[in-house]
Amino acid sequence: MGIKRIWRMSALHLSATLCAIFVVLLLISGWATNRTIRAEVRAEIDAGLIELAESDAAEFTVASDVISLFAGDNEAGAASLTEGYLAPDETVHGQLRRDIFDQTGFLTLPASALFNEAGIAELREDWRFPSEEAFQPEAGLWRVYVLPLAGGRMAYLEEIEDFESVLAVIPGVVAGVGIPAIVATLLAGLGLGWRQQRRLDRISGGLARIADGDFSQRIAPARLHDDLDQVMWDVDGAAIRLQGSFDQLRYFTQHLAHELRTPLARLRASIEDLGDGPANLTVLDRTDEVIRIFDAVQRIARLSGRDGRAGMGEVDLGQVAQLMEDLFAEIADHNGQRLQLRLSNPAIIRGDQQLIAQLVSNLVDNAVRHSGAGSTITLAVEGDQITVTDTGPGIEAEKLSRLCTPFDQLGNNQTFGMGLGLALVRAIADYHRATMSVGKGESGGLCIVVRFSQREGSPFGRTLPQTANEVISL
Amino acid sequence: MNILLLEDDKVLAEWTIRSLSNAGHVVDHLEDGRSALIAATTRDYDLIILDRMVPELNGMAVLRTLRASKVAAPVLMLTALGDVEDRVEGLEAGADDYLTKPFAQSELLARVMALGRRNLAAEATEPSLLRYADLELDLLKQKCRRAGRAIDLNPKELRLIEAFLRAPGRVLTRTMLLERVWQLNFDPGTNVVDTHVSRLRAKIDRPFPVALIRTVRGAGYVLGD
């Protein structure tokens, strides 16, 4: 299975889309959670600080009472890391910097902007930090609430670094959970898609066989479990109906052939009985022409819509070309034309010997009839490719595409009948799944190329049936 | 020759019988497969002509039964089915020749003559030297002489004169020549066969007083004097 096919798996597209949606939702919810938690925690911290402030405001009305909180050693030391006081006489109590008291309200500050040197030194030795080096004054974040109290200003502190570091973990968790989940989902999508692909291939195969005229295969399972099974069932249903139509058509054409040939045979027989007079011979000639046309049309009809299966053997293209050169050399000579054969690694292909001989014969006959006196006709076989070129007047570009349409007159009596011979060439080429192109040769004449390599058969790379000839210029 | 004809179309049967009788043959005519099968197994015919699409038992079934019953008479199949596959099917089932309707009277007569038991046997032998009047063809050396003089023929001309020499005095139609010389079962159009024959005549007949290859108008060619 190539990269291109993996790329086109609808199951993979589906799981990739689901993953993308999942990622987006995950990111959104992660961000929302982050913000919500942060807001909640902040609100709680702030509420706690306000509560402290309110209880102090109720309890302390004299500055000296407040100052006495900061006196003493350990107890005060502990207090000094959570509070600070700017007395009415402008003295700072606690280990905060003076400038934080300039404003009232809430502030968020790192330790370096909050504490004075003594405070920072104390923090360094604090039990919260595993080592002195672990403490980073610029990094640690504190929430500060400053408000007037007993004539001065009181600052209440709460460290929020812990919460910040907890919140910082969330993106990591999201990534840690999300990325493996995404990868796992994509792989699961690939795996399921692989399985699904086989069923899709079955459907593709079934449709391809129908397109080739094989209506006998059935692809649906005995029990239908899902919509793909339903599609398979529908494909089988279409095959059955098409089989019916084809059978009817085949029966009809086969009996039509019989029904028409018998009256034609009677007609011809009666004319032969009329005798050898010139008028009778003319009528007989015209009747034979009708029979030839009927023959060719019937053969084209029988070849179309069928793939070569029965009657195929090994055909040496070089041998067939030689036979045709042999056959037509005299008449070309008689017409003042030159017929030359060019063989280059002629291939041996699977095909119907008589049909391929007819194909080459029609091409050469066409060139002999229409390229005019003095023209050089080249019959070339290169590998599995047959080319017939002439140096005659050729056909105008606009008319080239109509060349293989039966009965298309191309507006010139001379070319009547050209369409039928080439239409049979086209039918035989299609029967062998060969490609046919019509164009202008180097010297302006007509150039027809038939290539016997198998047409593309893969489900994604299938070429659509050709309804018009390719026009190429060589 | 004693010929058995199985053909259910009255008009065509009458015409076929008349053509064959005029050429000196004796024809027994039946219109359904079952009667034809009985007749073919109880009487000895030089040639059996079977139409494929007939009532009771179709031509192919009659053919298969005949061959299974070891009836060795040559069989010519007539049919209104024109597929290449039908022809192959008929020949593989044991028919000796196969004609698609509509066909010319001359075509029928030429092929009937070719299928006469003696002629079939004669054509099947592998002589190393073929001779007619003063014309000689050495198959081993691939050399041709007339009245003692060597005639230079290219391979296809050799195959062409060989076909004539194997059927001396019998008409060879253009389609028969295409089958025998070029192994083609279709008509390539134009008059390719005619040009080949006239080239051959230029080498074989023109330098000599008597022409051996003659045109039979409306039918084909014959090696005869």
Image: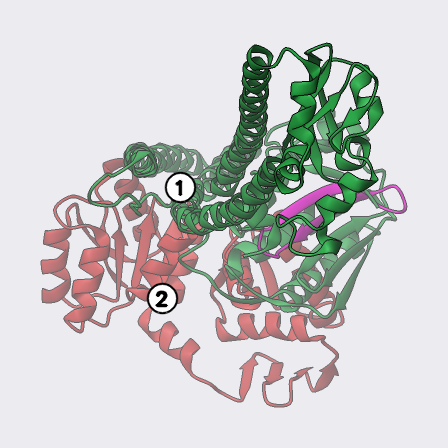
Chain colours: A green, B red
Q: Which mark is residue A210?
A: 1
Of labels 1 and 2, the one closer to you:
1
Quarter holding residue A331: bottom right
- Residue A171 seen in the figure: yes
Q: Nearer the viewer, residue A400 or A223?
A: A223
The residue lying at 41 percent from left, 79 percent from top is B124
Quarter of the image with the N terminus of chain B is bottom left
- Residue B96, above or below A30: below
Query: Residue A422, how many percent across, how many down?
Result: 63, 41
Residue wearing tag 2: B115
Query: Residue A165, how many percent across, how many down?
Result: 62, 40
Which residue range is magenta in the image?
A434-455
Query: Residue A449, how many percent across, how many down?
Result: 71, 49
Q: Which mark is residue A365?
A: none
Q: In terms of secondary structure, where does tag 1 sit?
A: helix
Residue at mark 2: chain: B
